[in-house]
Image: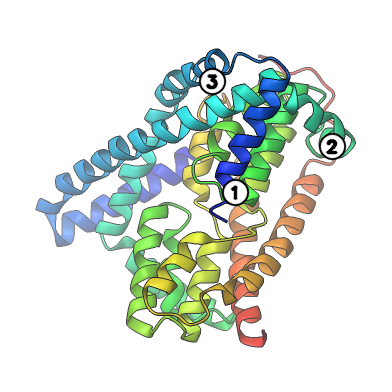
Amino acid sequence: MNGIFAAMFALSALLFLIFDPSGFLPALLKGGEKAVSLALSLMAAYCVWLGFFSVMEKSGLNRLLARGLRPVLSRLFRSKDERALSAACCSVSANLLSLPGAPTPLGIEAVRRFLEKGNTFGANMLFVLNAAGIQLMSTTAITFRLAAGSLTPADTVLPTLLATICSAVLAVTLTFLAQKRPRGKPKRA
Amino acid sequence: MSLLFPLLFLGVFAFALCRKVKLYDAFSEGVKGAVPLLLSLFPSLAAVLILSELFSESGLSEMLARLLAPVLEALGVPKELAPLVLIKPFSGSGAMAFLNDIITTHGADSYLARCASVVYGSSETTFYLSALYFAGAKKVSPLPVVIALFCNLLAAVLGCLFCRIL
């Protein structure tokens, strides 16, 4: 991440220097502004979904869910931490349904729990699953096409689903292959 | 689809009430976690967004898109979609604006619009997501990001293929 940041920042700044020196600072500030407004809308989504998730957790629904899927989940993420697994499970299913704002806070919670136990594999697996995961419905594209007068706005659902199934399978396989050795050794921190 | 949310909340809350959960307390306890979570994420969030703004405003993304276009075209992704493929990992809102642009200029039911919808829907804001997910981690390996980017590219290629044959 640091390397990418440095390279992209330097290249962009260089281009600004050559073509549009006065546009540099406004662009930076615009990015900051976007971060602030995005943080506010993220905050709204986090309040709703973390509240919802806490109710799920208190009611024991989470445990039921995680217990039912445990054989699959614990192998997929190589973890026995029930809370982390249930958060991961909820995050992946929220991503599957493209619930706006829901996958991220749950995913972050699960990733932190995995990393606390030194389970990099589980954290990576969850990230890959959410970043290259299966999409049942992409509502944004459908909304846009409907607004532009499309007669068959939903005809992209099937190609998207098929393409993401392939990419998800590949992502999981690659993650397994990349970290095939069992990481049983205790981590430093 | 719109029924999903009310049903989901009603179902879970009803279940919680049956289990004698104090709904108000449980919900507000969950919300309590939102502030520290956001505070811990904000630095990475801001850095990535400022970078992505620079990336698109400086024209660097356009240059890269022009370089990338022939490669994508060879893989069956129309060259008009190169900027979309490139922007999506960094910025969801940027990609969204671009998607809308393609849909309105080329027609809602054109092949390009359908391809763009699939490319948009099947990829994820990978860099942004990795910044959030691994914000607290001490050492971040680039491996999952590379895997995710590669798989998103594959999804774009396959998606355009499926658009043609389905």
- SS of the residue under disc 1: helix
Percent from the top left, x then y, of residue B160? 59, 78
Please give the chain letter of the residue carrying mark 3: B
Residue at the limit of the structure toward the right, as seen here: A71
- Separation of disc 1 and disc 2 at Cα? 22 Å
Q: Which mark is residue A69?
A: 2
- SS of the residue under disc 3: helix
- The amino acid type, in three-letter code, at marker 3 is Phe
- Separation of disc 1 and disc 3 at Cα? 20 Å
In the image, B130: left or right of A14? Answer: right
- SS of the residue under disc 2: helix
Which residue: 67% across, 87% down?
Answer: B165
In the image, A32: left or right of B123? Answer: left
In the image, B65: left or right of A171? Answer: left
Please say if A117 is above or below A121.
above
Of labels 3 and 2, the one closer to you: 3
- The amino acid type, in three-letter code, at marker 2 is Leu
Which residue: 56% across, 42% down?
Answer: B6
Percent from the top left, x then y, of residue B98? 36, 67
How many neighbours does mark 3 have within 10 angstroms: few (below 14), some (14-19), or many (20 or more)? many
Quadrant placement of the C terminus of chain B: bottom right
Please give the chain letter of the residue carrying mark 2: A
How many neighbours does mark 2 have within 10 angstroms: few (below 14), some (14-19), or many (20 or more)? some
Q: Nearer the viewer, residue A39 or B56?
A: A39
Q: Which mark is residue B114?
A: none
Residue tagged 3: B27
Residue tagged 1: B4
Q: Are marks 3 and 2 on the same chain?
A: no
Of labels 1 and 2, the one closer to you: 1
The quarter holding residue A31 reads top left
Q: Are marks 1 and 3 in contact (CB under 8 Å)?
A: no
Please give the chain letter of the residue carrying mark 1: B
